[in-house]
């Protein structure tokens, strides 16, 4: 029998149902998206009160799923190659270089935001948990940068293995934390539903919280590799299979992250959330100081470090 016919038959059979390949990519997308943005979402979403958080919860799936699906479809629209090659194929070499430049400017602010947050988190850990005076910020940030760059210099293979080791315990810790906070739930957040909020303030709260929500579910850097692999594995069925994998991954993301977010918000008061925002620390750092739970700060530092390393090392279009 013709080998090409046999290969086509195998591809068709594989694409009929859910496969181990789909599960691997679903977990990969999920693990890549869940990062340090999750640690700031409860603060930025909850500080505005009840209704903005409800709206964000309703927007979480459609905003992130359709954006990632659109990017996947764009990569699949090319004959072959990653997103840069597809842009060059459709719009020319100049556009490909422009997309690469824009991609850099999209990632660079994330590095700045979470570099500051990691410095604040580590300083809070040393002050409140270790009961020692942290060094000056300039020295602390320099040590952190040198440490991160040393890890990056180990090579992508080491980094990928380190990310895979860190991400799933981190997600498990978030879920366990969300469950452990249930006894501390109170009615302070629900009481804010009756507080009057002007439309300009409501829109401003959403405007500031939506970027943090997007960071919490963002796996756009891996979409290019994801689409290329789906095209190689499924051929003509790549678009349909990619959409299914993305839908399952995003469903898991929204359920777990929003459960964590609501659990944190319900365990604190609006005043607590405002204090956490003023201190510019992650929700885990504030919870660790508020409930005197040292292990939470370890999770926060791990998450921030993981996100910074992954952005510096291999978020390449």
Image (tube, rainbow, N blue to C red):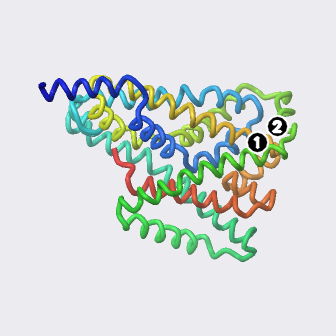
Residue at 64% from the left image edge and 49% from the top image edge: 39
| Residue 305 horizontal/vertical position (percent) | 53, 60
Quarter of the image where one finds residue 80: top left
Question: Could you tell which of marks 1 and 2 lies nearer the N-terminus?
Answer: 2
Quarter of the image where one finds residue 17: top left
Residue in the foreground of this view, choosing between 16 and 242: 16
Q: Are marks 1 and 2 in contact (CB under 8 Å)?
A: yes
In the picture of the structure, the residue carrying the numbered disc 2 is: 189
Q: Is residue 179 above or below residue 134?
A: above
Q: Residue 265 shows which numbered tag?
A: 1
Residue at 76% from the left image edge and 61% from the top image edge: 293
Residue at 34% from the left image edge and 41% from the top image edge: 225
Residue in the foreground of this view, choosing between 245 and 127: 245
Question: For the C terminus, which image quadrant?
Answer: top left
Residue in the foreground of this view, choosing between 283 and 6: 6
Q: Secondary structure at mark 1?
A: helix
Of all residues, the one furthest to the left in this rendering is 2
């Amino acid at each position: 029998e013709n080998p090409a016919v046999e290969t086509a038959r195998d591809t068709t059979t594989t694409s009929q149902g859910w496969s181990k390949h789909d599960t691997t990519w679903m977990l990969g997308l999920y693990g890549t998206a869940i990062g340090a943005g999750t640690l700031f979402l409860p603060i930025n979403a909850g500080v505005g009160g009840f209704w903005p958080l409800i709206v964000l919860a309703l927007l979480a799936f459609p905003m992130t799923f359709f954006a990632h699906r659109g990017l996947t479809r764009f990569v699949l629209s090319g004959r072959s190659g990653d997103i840069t090659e597809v842009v060059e194929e459709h719009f020319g070499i100049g556009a490909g270089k422009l997309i690469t430049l824009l991609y850099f400017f999209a990632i660079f602010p994330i590095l700045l935001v979470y570099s500051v947050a990691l410095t604040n988190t580590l300083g809070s850990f040393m002050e409140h948990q270790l009961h020692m005076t942290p060094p000056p910020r300039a020295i602390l940030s320099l040590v952190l940068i040198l440490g991160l760059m040393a890890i990056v210099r180990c090579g992508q293979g080491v980094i990928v293995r380190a990310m895979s080791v860190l991400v799933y315990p981190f997600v498990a810790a978030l879920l366990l934390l969300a469950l452990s906070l249930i006894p501390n739930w109170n009615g302070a957040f629900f009481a804010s539903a009756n507080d009057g909020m002007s439309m300009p303030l409501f829109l401003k709260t959403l405007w500031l919280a939506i970027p943090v929500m997007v960071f919490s579910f963002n796996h756009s850097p891996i979409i290019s590799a994801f689409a290329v692999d789906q095209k190689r594995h499924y051929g003509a069925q790549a678009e349909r299979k990619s959409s299914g994998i993305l839908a399952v991954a995003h469903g898991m993301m929204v359920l777990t992250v929003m459960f964590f977010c609501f659990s944190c918000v319900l365990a604190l008061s609006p005043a607590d959330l405002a204090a956490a925002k003023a201190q510019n620390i992650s929700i885990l750092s504030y919870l660790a100081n508020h409930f005197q739970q040292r292990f939470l700060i370890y999770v926060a530092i791990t998450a921030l470090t993981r996100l910074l390393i992954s952005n510096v090392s291999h978020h390449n279009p």
